[in-house]
Image: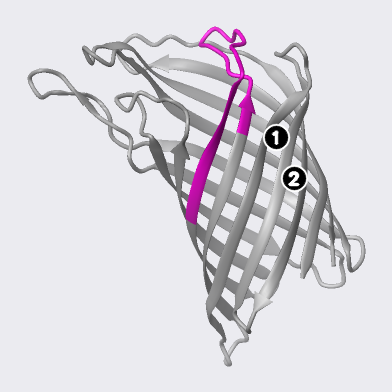
Amino acid sequence: MKRCLIALVALCCCMPFRAQSMSDDVDTQTRRYQMVELRQSAGVDFKIGKHGSIGLTEEIREIVFDSRNDPMAYFSKSYTSIEGGWKFLSLTDAYNGHKYGMKISAGYTLRYLNQKLRDSQGNLRTPNDYLRHRPYLVLTGSANFGAVKLSLRERYLADFRTDSVNVLEKPKCYMELRSRLTADFTIPGQTYKPYTSIEFANTLNQPSCFDANGNKLYGGQYLSAIRARVGLRWRLNLNNTLTFTYGFHWGQSREVNITRKSQEINRLYMEQTSKHVVTVAYEFGM
């Protein structure tokens, strides 16, 4: 089966954006901006026997409008991925017809980033161009109950940085676990399918820092993101599909500045973001 995602346009209205101190003094900042992103992806999948598969995808992302940036359009990032999967469980309950499945997948993604980074006041900094290597492991379970299909995906990923990083502030290899629950609904006689999903992302290896007396100053793992979506897939014909989605994305990251030699903490706060994301996608597959 070959699948080609021709274009994906996402309108992201990000509000609010705030940075909060992790101490008793809370500094709150709110910034509102609009962004339009174009995503182009192409991929090919091959079946291996009855239960195996391997696929290769290439995705390019461009920012075509950014209200915070001058120029407003720029290349953002690209993803080159290869993934292999094996469906090790597929059964049907003979009593009520419910279907169950389990699949394990492993893959590798090469990310090239050209991000327009900003400081805490929102001022544009020099673009940071570098590669990241991301191996990942995915375990997916699904169950069909008549017109409803539920699936739970557990995705472990490791993100290896190639740029210089202070390991006292953040790990050279960032590890994360993403858990996503999805519900797909089939309406008899209709060519469209509503769906909804919610995903939680948790850090796995954030560094900790201790003072001279062994007291923990900061550290530990935390919930880094919540992504909720509701949408509609409309199959125009055998090879063409339109997808409409609204999503609310909430995220937070710990921002720490530590002097390498003295290991003194100069800055410590938690940055939180909230985004409203509207997506329209067209997919062509054969």
Tag 2 residue? 245
Q: Does dot 1 land on a helix, a strand or a loop?
A: strand
Q: Which residue lies furthest to the right in this view?
A: 237
Left or right, 48 with reference to 10:
left
Between residues 85 and 245, which one lies in front from this camera angle? Answer: 85
Identify the magenta region. 113-136
* C-alpha gap between disc 2 and disc 1: 8 Å
Residue 118 in the magenta stretch? The answer is: yes
Quarter containing the N terminus: bottom right
Placement of 68 over or under 277, stated as above or below: above
- 32 to 276, vertically: above or below: above
Across and down, in percent, residue 222 comes to 36, 36
Q: Callout 2: 10 Å neighbours few (<14), some, many (20+)?
A: some
Residue 277, numbered circle: 1
Looking at the picture, which amino acid does disc 1 mark? Val
Quadrant where the C terminus lies? bottom right
Which amino acid does the dot numbered 2 rest on?
A: Thr
